[in-house]
Amino acid sequence: MTAADFPPVHEARAALGRLLFYDKILSGNRNISCGTCHHHDHAGGDGLSLGIGEGGAGVAQDRSAGEGRARIEKRVPRNAPALFNLGAREVRVLFHDGRLSRSDRYGVGFDTPAEERLPQGLSSPLAAQALFPLTSEVEMAGSPEENEVAVAAYDRIDRVWPILAKRVRTIPAYGARLVDAFDDLDHPSDATIVHVAEALAAFIDAEWRSYDSRYDLWLAGEARLSSAEHRGRRLFFGKAGCAACHGSKFFTDQAFHALALPPFGPGRTRRFDPYARDLGRMGQTDLLADAYRFRTPALRNVALTAPYGHNGAYPTLEGIVRHHLDPMRALEDWRREAAALPEAPWLAARDFVAFEDRREMQRLTRRVDVRPLALSDGEIEDLVAFLGALTGGDSVKGRLGRPAAVPSGLPVD
């Protein structure tokens, strides 16, 4: 991987996106930002199995589920994904279930939950993806009884974005930066949500590019790997079969696979599905063959992005590696204490409904795309060592970092 795998960095847009990324002005109740769940101090994540979105307080493991009328109504259904290399030209599908992909299906360049209502002019999957947490009740929008953004989201998804774009462009400091960053803008009043999304994407892309790990430097002949890392590399690309799904230079095939990870949380259910479960890719395609399949995650800096799995079921790399090697045994041995879930007593009765449902567990275990493989404890240690060699240098903390303040004047997490 080199800089050629990415679009040119647009510094003015990235600088603007950095402020927007940490500005709570983009949330319905002005109380959460993108950076709350994708924080610099936690390698672009939050360290939780399932995030605490709108209504919570604090960051990462110190984040609480809120209290009183403001407390959360449910957890974010899936683990906050890492942000490394999402702006690369090769990226064609995003989200754990792939509900956003490059496509001409709706005449807007992408296949997304907004269908033909997605704004025209978005340049990349990353820019399109940036729009959707803003519309989610549990992530950033809030409840309809609380604010106009949530009311709009409840009505029709594309009615959210003009409200937020106006919030941004009418702040003088943002208006000036928008005009400076985009050649098609003569006046702040012309700015739309597309400009906001493009700025966010420019920042995420430039901030978390990762191709400077010791493994990358080893490939270039500029660094050495330890004996354990070399053994792990040979296992990864050979006997262990990891490269079957993680074999590209981005360490993902961008495809979907079922691993029978322990189910918990509210799940990302379909509108007509009464169960608190997560069907993965099937939730988008309605194809039984896609049941419980999730997108293969990329692995650069993976040692920094625990917990692991689409729902953060495993707190350690060793745990998720062992699950891949024998999903049925790992599922049987898994204990709910492994899940990093901030305390929310009013949700406790629902947190593990799927895990306790015998029929749901039978359905889950019928869909497994990997075969058991016996590796010694030493070989597993070597695999984990190699994964550690994928940790980057400058990419770990980002180029620009977290801003001390944002133009809205709202507090920065």
Image (tube, rainbow, N blue to C red):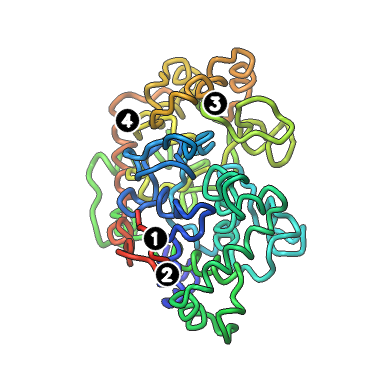
Q: Check contact, mark 1 vs mark 4: CB within 8 A.
A: no
Cα–Cα span, label 1 and label 2: 35 Å
**Left or right of 130 in this view: 154:** right
Q: Which of marks 1 and 4 is in front?
A: 1
Residue at the disc numbered 4: 379
Q: Nearer the viewer, residue 189 or 286?
A: 189
Give amino acid for label 4.
Glu
Quick one: label 1 or label 3, which is nearer the N terminus?
Answer: 3
Q: Nearer the viewer, mark 4 or mark 2?
A: 2
Would residue 241 be seen by someone viewing this image from the given angle?
no
Quick one: label 1 or label 2, which is nearer the N terminus?
Answer: 2
Q: Is mark 2 on a helix, strand or loop?
A: helix
Compared with 391, 206 (above or below) is below
Q: Which of 34 and 378 is in front in this view?
A: 34
Please state, as top left, top right, bottom left or bottom right, where the N terminus lies in the image.
bottom left
What percent of the width, then of the height, locates residue 406?
A: 38, 66
- The residue at the point 53 percent across, 22 percent down is 350
Residue at the disc numbered 2: 3
Give amino acid for label 1.
Leu
Give amino acid for label 3.
Ala
What percent of the width, then of the height, locates residue 31?
A: 44, 51
Residue at the disc numbered 1: 410
Cα–Cα span, label 1 and label 3: 41 Å
What percent of the width, then of the height, locates residue 39?
A: 36, 52
Cα–Cα span, label 1 and label 4: 49 Å
**Crowding at mark 2 (Cα within 10 Å: few <14, some 14-19, many 20+):** few
Residue at the disc numbered 3: 260
Q: Which of marks 2 and 3 is in front?
A: 3
Q: Is mark 1 on a helix, strand or loop?
A: loop
